[in-house]
Amino acid sequence: MFSIGSTPWSRDALIEAMPEFLRMWSRRPWDANPGGMGATHMFFTWFTVRQLDPQYIVESGVLHGAGTWMLEQAAPAAKLFCIDTRRKRPSIYASRRAHYQRKDFSKTVWGALDKERTLLFFDDHQDWHRIQHAKASGFQHVIYEDNDPIDIGVLTVKAALAQQAEPAEWLMANVETYYEFPPIFANRSKGPFLYDQFSDVTHPPLFDERDPAFQPFVDNAGGYYYMAYLKIKKGRP
């Protein structure tokens, strides 16, 4: 496991927020979200949005639109910018008030946004350079969703930090806070990243025993991929 700066919120705060999230989850307008987030990462994202209360949200990687629906539930007053370079229209949910575009985040001029009140949500399977792009545009708050601990062709933030090479040096110098959400329940039965195999680079799960009150998180234990919140330092790189 790895962290930079102070922990922005406690494990108890995460646990206390779960019942409210699950009430929202029960109203979701889909039964399946193939290739997209499950309950675990949806909760982490919803929780972060509620904590930061952003005025603007940039969602890079829309897929079926399930994440867009969840972001609107978490921040109903925020202005959403939804980017997907490969798909024309999401199949689960399309917001009537979000701005949709196919131009990549790194190729977009974001001058009109209040950068301190904007949250970037990267669910687009891109590498750690997304953080450099965010820094160059003046943004501070980032959720980095697909954060695999090993290099699988995309060098994630977590994998870059583990290398302690040039990418790690840049991140250490330019990131004020790097916080990985812990697993809610340990994944020991399915999925590519089994907890017992990667426990030395993973925070302890929030719960040791499976709790039927949190069944959506139990069912989605294999969907944990080290989602992280980053706060980028102000100023020039």
Image (spheres, rainbow, N blue to C red):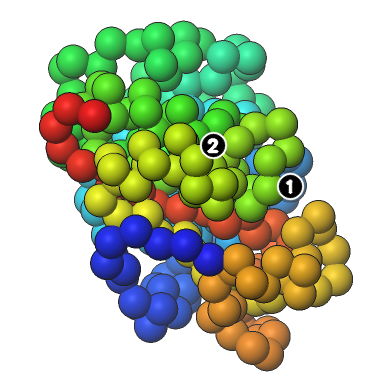
Marker disc for residue 125: none
Instruction: Name the residue tied to disc 1.
Output: 32
Q: Nearer the viewer, mark 1 or mark 2?
A: 2
With respect to residue 127, does 229 lie above or below?
below
Please name whichever residue, 68 or 12, is drawn nearer the observer in this view of the structure. Answer: 12
Which mark identifies residue 123? 2
Q: Residue at x 85, y 64 (%)?
A: 190
Amino acid found under the numbered disc labelled 1: Ala
- Of residues 155 and 88, the one nearer the viewer is 155
Position of 97 with respect to 137 (left or right) is right
Q: Quadrant of residue 127?
A: top right
Above-or-below relation of 44 to 134: below
x, y (%) of residue 159?
Answer: 58, 46
Q: Position of residue 11 (x, y in %)?
A: 41, 78
Residue 71, horizontal then vertical, whole percent: 41, 44
* Residue in the picture at 59% in, 61% down: 40
Q: Closer to the camera, 199 or 217?
A: 199
The three-letter code of the residue at mark 2 reads Asp
For residue 173, above or below residue 63:
below
